[in-house]
Image (cartoon, rainbow, N blue to C red):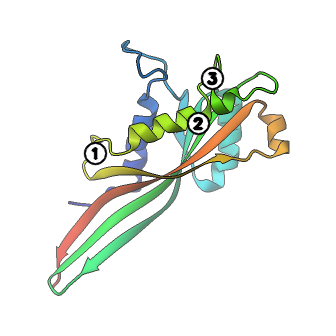
Amino acid sequence: MAYLSFLTVLDALKTRLASLPLDPADASADPDKLFERVEYYGANDLPQALMDLLVIQQRVCVIVPASWDHQNERDRVMFKSVRTIHLDLYIADRAMTLRDQAALVGGAKNLGILAMADRVVTNLAGTIFATPNFVVEPTLGTPVVISSAEKKNLPGREAFLQAVTILAGMIRATVP
């Protein structure tokens, strides 16, 4: 076994999220997608990325690499290291009706960020990916507070942050 690279993990997750149908019961060959756009950005680019994507698209998911760590075990004959990658998923929806909570809880034309986050977690948790040694563990999920100044530029927008931990491979070696 080997470690999975950060880019391999990002690409596999992006592909999975981009393929999720808006309506799980839609069995057509090309159903509408849960997210109109799925992209990954660095944390330093996140504010501008969110402004660019959120102004244009209604339902988006932005993947942000957070960190990685390695849990190591060693005895006199073997060394084992397991890689864990931590990512943040920013899930956003928009409702263009005044004083309506549709972007949060859903409505006639919106699924809402809570239902979107629930579908993401349900789909990713414990699902077998085509990439070997790849397991997604959802962790903390929380609504994102959008400031009053940002609300002026992003009317009707709600966002949710879902953190995920990905078990991304292992290395074993004989200790000389």
Q: Position of residue 146 (x, y in %)?
A: 75, 44
Asked if residue 50 can be seen in this view, the reply is yes
Q: Secondary structure at mark 1?
A: loop
Q: Position of residue 16 (x, y in %)?
A: 40, 36
Q: What residue do we see at 24% from left, 81% from top?
A: 74
Counting residues from the N terminus, which is met first, the one under dot 1 or under dot 3?
3
Question: Would you say 16 lies left or right of 139 here?
Answer: left
**Residues marked 2 and 1 touching at CB (< 8 Å):** no
Q: Secondary structure at mark 2?
A: helix
CA gap between label 2 and label 1 equals 28 Å
Could you say which disc has been placed on residue 114 in the image? 2
Q: What residue do we see at 73% from left, 47% from top?
A: 145
| Mark count | 3
Could you say which disc has been placed on residue 131 in the image? 1
Q: What residue is disc 3 on?
A: 110
Front disc: 1 or 3: 3
Q: What residue do we see at 39% from left, 41% from top?
A: 124
Callout 2 crowding tier (Cα within 10 Å): few <14, some 14–19, many ≥20:
many
Q: Secondary structure at mark 3?
A: loop
Q: Amino acid at mark 3?
A: Asn
Q: Amino acid at mark 1?
A: Thr
